[in-house]
Image: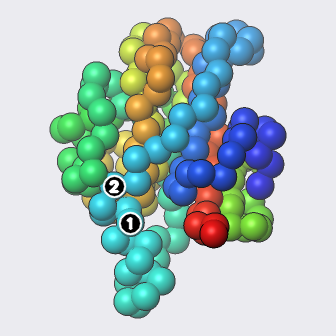
Amino acid sequence: MNTQTIGLGSRAHTGVTYLIEHLRGGEVLSAEVVENRMPAEGRNHMLGVTFKSVAPSANWYLGVFENNSYPADDLKASTVVATLGESVVYTPNTRPAFTPGVVAAGAVDNTAARAEFTFTESKRIYGGFMASSPTRGSGTGVLISAARFAAAKDVTAGDTLRVTAAFELVSASE
């Protein structure tokens, strides 16, 4: 995991950390790092896969949301659309895939294949999430992570949000 690329300074966080870059005309307008909320649905899924023979999700996808709301612990894939207001006015036509690199030192990221959302309309984007369904506006699958940006992103048609997501598990030290 390239912690310098996404600006991780400490190992006090378990879950997904996002680097969000707002681009217009190829120029980076802003960049910020935010940590996620890993809702109960995501935590339970991870534990079920590890300890209870729950079927793993083969792939994960990133999405962005338009509602001025904060992800809560009871947020689920089935409630993302209604609660967070998933944005669907971007290309590609599906949620961009989270394509992880090598798992090492308890971490994995998509630095080599960052997700990009190129907007087709002007919108205010408040945050992002990671779920197991590729379908925009879908309430199916599992929600593993959601994060509210520190500052909303006012995007216009043609703007791109580039997302680097890093998942890290840390062990408590003495």
Q: Is residue 101 left or right of residue 94?
A: right
Give me the residue at 21% from left, 48% from top: 79
Quadrant in which the C terminus appears: bottom right
Secondary structure beneath label 1: helix
Of 160 and 2, nearer the camera is 2
Q: Which mark is residue 43?
A: 1
Does 128 appear above or below 23? below
Kind of residue at disc 2 = Pro
Q: Is residue 94 visible in the rendered structure shown here?
A: no
Please, which residue is most extreme toward the front here?
Answer: 174
Q: Is residue 111 left or right of residue 58?
A: right
Query: Around disc 1, counting alpha carbons within 10 Å, would you say few (fewer than 14), some (14 to 19), or many (20 or more)?
Result: some
Kind of residue at disc 1 = Arg
Quadrant in which the N terminus appears: bottom right
Give me the residue at 64% from left, 15% from top: 30
Q: Position of residue 24 (x, y in %)?
A: 65, 11
Q: Is residue 47 left or right of residue 4?
A: left
Mark 2 — residue? Answer: 39
Q: Position of residue 136 (x, y in %)?
A: 37, 43
Secondary structure beneath label 2: loop
Q: Is residue 23 visible in the rendered structure shown here?
A: yes
Give me the residue at 58% from left, 44% from top: 17
Question: Tags 2 and 1 in contact by the CB under 8 Å rule?
Answer: yes
Q: Position of residue 61 (x, y in %)?
A: 50, 51
CA gap, disc 2 and disc 1: 6 Å
Query: Around disc 2, counting alpha carbons within 10 Å, would you say few (fewer than 14), some (14 to 19), or many (20 or more)?
Result: some
The figure's colour scheme reads: rainbow
Q: Position of residue 171 (x, y in %)?
A: 61, 68
Q: How many marks?
A: 2
